[in-house]
Image: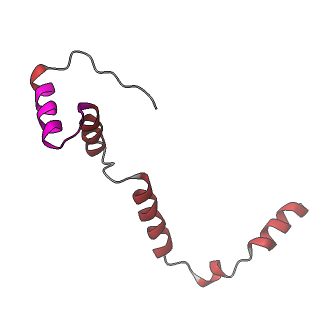
Amino acid sequence: MPLLQVRDCPEDIYNRIAKEAKKERRTIAQEILTLLEKGLGQEQSNIERRRKILEKINARDIPNRVKEIDPVVLIREDRDR
């Protein structure tokens, strides 16, 4: 896993992070990762995000003419070229 180092962190910010980490029973590193995930909009785990994407894909309305396309036929046509 990559290492991230922050230099010259203002003391008041560090103290706030340390206080919040203690309150949440996390290490400072864990608290900073949590804050970064929230700030980047990645509060959900990778599995949860993938599940939501798959749900969106499965919920799409696909026209019948597209559903009727046989992928085997398309592959054969491409290979025969």
User: Mainly helix, strand or loop, the magenta region?
Assistant: helix
Position above or below: 30 against 8: below
Q: Is residue 35 left or right of residue 54?
A: left
Residue at the image point whose x is 11% and y is 34% from the top: 19
Residue 21, position as x, y percentages in the image: 18, 37
Q: Is residue 3 above or below residue 64?
A: above
> Who's the residue at 15% across and 31% down the image?
18
**Quadrant (top left/top right/bottom left/bottom right) for the C terminus:** bottom right
Front one among 29 and 64: 29
Q: Which quadrant would residue 77 be assigned to in this image? A: bottom right
Colouring of the image:
secondary structure
Write the residue at 15% across / 37% down: 22
Residue 80, percent from left and from top: 90, 63
Is 70 a magenta residue? no
Q: Magenta segment: does it hold 24?
A: yes
Farthest-out residue, right: 80
Q: Which residues are magenta?
A: 13-28
Left or right of 13, for residue 37: right
Question: Which residue: 40% across, 25% down?
Answer: 3
